[in-house]
Image (cartoon, helix red, strand yellow):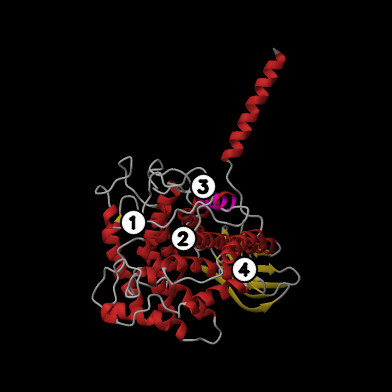
Amino acid sequence: MKKKLIYCITSLLFCCSLALAQTAEPAMPASAAEVAAIIKKANHYWQTANPNHGRAFWDNAAYHTGNMEAYKVTGTEAYKSYSEAWAGHNQWKGAKSDDKAGWKYSYGESDEYVLFGDYQIAFQTYIDLYNLDEVKDPKKIARAREVMEYQMSTSQNDYWWWADGLYMVMPVMTKLYHVTGNKQYLEKLYEYLSYANSIMYDEEEKLYYRDAKYVYPKHKSANSKKDFWARGDGWVFAGLAKVLQDLPTNDPHRNEYIEKFVGMAEAIKNSQQPEGYWTRSMLDPEHAPGPESSGTSFFTYGLLWGINNGFLGRDEYLPAALRGYKFLTEVALQPNGRVGYVQPIGERAIPGQVVDANSTANFGVGAFLLATSEMHRMVEQERVRLNESDLARNISAYPNVANSEVRVQLPAGLTCKSVLVKDETGKQVAKYKGKFTGEKVLPVKKLTKAPYALELKTSKGTITKTMLVQ
């Protein structure tokens, strides 16, 4: 009886520990080098398997948006060269027709579809390559400017009639604004997005239908629910992140972009599956069950970008981002470097469609590179933040209430360029500008029993420290 009781207790403890292991939140990657190795594994596989350069249509171009981010975080010159060769192969153009009277923007893959966003996404990479050049080559963005400036000169505002188009073209507008300073890019960006919102944005769910024909209740999922296609919303979410990256802080519509991005983030977080992925129909997992990596990559990228840039709360959104990253790097990424579980080209969640470890595609790899590159940035930021925390602990601040002053002591080897002291309301009560090492006494208007914040600009970056006056 005693042995049986011990066995039961042991079994129960084992089951409990297994359950805890399965529900434990994934940890941050150990280092940026670990993330870089994952990026290189996936990108090396893709570029080795695809040495020839295809047309400048959306699927290839979407890969290159991810490849450029991989270049930016790893510095691997082969990645930049790969995109340069693709751009040159396509003459730094999208669709190639020069007959403006025949330019179209409905769906089409021939060269007269110059105004169709699926042929404009290539401009993102061309602009990035142009910006990376020390000596600028105007030919790299000449076609992008020609096409977009012609488009903006027309009276139409319905160019973005499908969700994918928001990723394809919104970032082109903000990138060209930065190159040219032409505010019309931002004005038309808002005008075109407003049209898109009017036909496919669901105010209640804070998500986008793929296009107008999928709006509920005209279209329903297998279980009569709203059918939001994961990759479609992934395109939008990632596109908004890219827009906010480049949008001026004084843009009159900036808060609306932020509101859309944050609203989507909450809906995305709430629809994630426990295993870390998102199903193809976001709110009806039974419609097309099982993992899918392209939508998951875009969502993971957007969540990480939002956290990295202060738009999303770390405590609330990091667990979802880490679960997505874990699925992408431990399940979707195969041992040979292939990114699997990519739903084939399409526009909706299809019941019964096979999506498995062998399912891969250029745009899916691009999305994977976006997500992993943003994780690389997060790990780097974390390293810097921890280093700053170590420095802050070695800086001493001694308040003297009687003399209304603060004595700041720096550790050896650290030079300070300026110091700000703020009270708990954020009001500045002391300021010193000038280099010093060792110790500096700062006069303060008045010290009361309260916490104060010190902001020190040093030879090792900006460091903040809290000082409590008791």
Real-space CA distance between mark 2 and mark 3, rounded to the nearest whole angstrom: 21 Å
Query: Looking at the image, is mark 4 or mark 2 nearer the viewer?
Result: 4
Looking at the rendered structure, the secondary structure element under dot 4 is helix
How busy is the neighbourhood of tag 2: few (under 14 within 10 Å), some, or many (20 plus)? some
Real-space CA distance between mark 4 and mark 3, rounded to the nearest whole angstrom: 26 Å
Real-space CA distance between mark 1 and mark 3, rounded to the nearest whole angstrom: 23 Å
How busy is the neighbourhood of tag 1: few (under 14 within 10 Å), some, or many (20 plus)? many
Q: Amino acid at mark 4?
A: Thr
x and y, in percent, of residue 267 in the image: 40, 50
Q: Main secondary structure of the magenta part?
A: helix
Residue on which the image places disc 4: 74
- Residue drawn at 65 percent across, 64 percent down: 388
Q: Which mark, by number, is residue 276?
A: 3
Looking at the rendered structure, the secondary structure element under dot 1 is loop
How busy is the neighbourhood of tag 3: few (under 14 within 10 Å), some, or many (20 plus)? many
Upstream in sequence: badge 4 or badge 2: 4
Query: Which quadrant of the figure contains the N terminus?
Result: top right
Image quadrant of residue 201?
A: bottom left
Are circles 2 and 3 on residues that touch, CB within 8 Å?
no
Upstream in sequence: badge 2 or badge 3: 3
| Residue numbers of the magenta segment | 320-330
Residue on which the image places disc 1: 210
Upstream in sequence: badge 1 or badge 3: 1
Where 22 sits versus 148, above or below?
A: above
Where 418 sits versus 296, above or below?
A: below
Whether residue 166 is visible here, answered yes or no, is yes
x and y, in percent, of residue 199 in the image: 26, 59
71 vs 179, left or right, is right
x and y, in percent, of residue 85 in the image: 53, 77
Query: Looking at the image, is mark 2 or mark 3 nearer the viewer?
Result: 3
Q: Amino acid at mark 1?
A: Arg
Which residue occupies the foreground of this view, 398 or 349? 349
